[in-house]
Image (spheres, grey):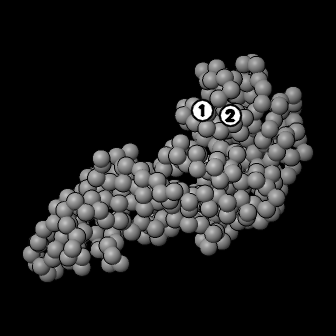
Amino acid sequence: MANMRLVLDGAALAENWRALDRLSGGARAGAAVKADGYGLGAVEVVTRLARAGCTDFFVAHWHEAQALAGLVDPARLAVLHGIAPGEEQVAVSGVAVPVLNSADQIARWRQAGGGLCHVMIDTGMSRLGLDWREDIAGLCAGLDVDLCLSHLASADEDSAQNELQRQRFEQVRGQVSARRYSLANSAGIALGSGFHFDCTRPGLALYGGVPCPALAEHIRPVMRLEARVLQVRQVRAGDTIGYGATFAAPRDMRTATLSLGYADGFKRALSSIGGFSCEGQRLPLLGRVSMDLTCIDVSAAPALGEGDWIAADLDLPLAEAATGISQYEWLTQIGRRFDRVWLD
């Protein structure tokens, strides 16, 4: 048993997907489950979302798709990075469907025997995908395309780029014969029906992140981070705590050292500003977060002792605002040393 755990609310995860599916209007919401389900555990996430009614899932790598074998219809599991040289065999194995991102990937797919595929169009992100100004119709001619998709660069901002990308994608729709079309991520869903097309691809919001204010009232927290108290001690006025002696006790204090640090994804950026909660009391973080340990003031929690569990105040939007570290990083960089406890 680890001394750190993520307490995960499966009912909240499912309800977040249902809310995003409703907000997607006539489109059907899928789920981005790459990066091990945004750090929460892809197998557990997919199992719960499939039970809730989700049928489309998106991963980045082929090994992520292989880890989900048997859980979902492989024809509805997409590998966003497509086919790198040497991946042709796994791509045609039927474990998932490749998202073809370039003329070279399309050529490798044809040479490998082809079949059902997806196609990514770059409408303004200049990252992955066929450039929308290319001969899209010629490149995709003869392909059996299920999903034609693009990705919004600024969906979480009030940006003219969103509408520009939507218009470009509308143009592309006339050039690619596909069963379905997809543009919107989590924040893109909130941009309105013109961005929904046939399938939306929420990620962050499924897991309790709030990428834009319009989604705040619809999203429930999924993750609670808890750590165990390793030691409780009395610190005297003037004593310093942690590396660099950045905190000096202004008075005699009761402190606790927790089994949690930046090696676990609990960022150093929270040093001196983060906190924990116990029975309604906020217990502030003292000094620097170190690799494996964090110290807090437990003067207001006299019953808290060694071996007890305590929850971090880690509201994702507030953590992003306080530290400048994105909600995506908070979720996906939670360390592997945590036990994961699902409540559902």
Alpha-carbon span between mark 2 and mark 1 = 8 Å
The total of numbered circles placed on residues is: 2
Q: Say which residue label 1 marks.
A: 69
Disc assigned to residue 74: 2
Residue 123, disc:
none
Q: Give coordinates of residue 42: x percent, y percent.
A: 53, 44
CB-based contact (under 8 Å), mark 2 and mark 1: yes
Mark 1 neighbour density, 10 Å: few (under 14) some (14–19) many (20 or more): some
In the image, residue 93 sits, relative to residue 302, either above or below, namely above
At horizontal 18% and vertical 70% (from top left) the residue drawn is: 255
Question: Residue 85: percent from the left, percent from the top?
Answer: 62, 23
The answer to which quarter of the image holds residue 297 is bottom left
Identify the element where label 1 is drawn: loop
Q: Amino acid at mark 2?
A: Pro
Of the residues under marks 2 and 1, which one precedes in the sequence? Answer: 1
> SS class of the residue under badge 2?
helix
Question: Which residue is pictured at 73% across the width and 24% down the height?
Answer: 109
Query: In the shown orientation, is residue 210 left or right of residue 197?
Result: left
* 235 vs 100, nearest the viewer: 235
Left or right of 100? Residue 309 is: left
Residue 93, by quadrant, is top right
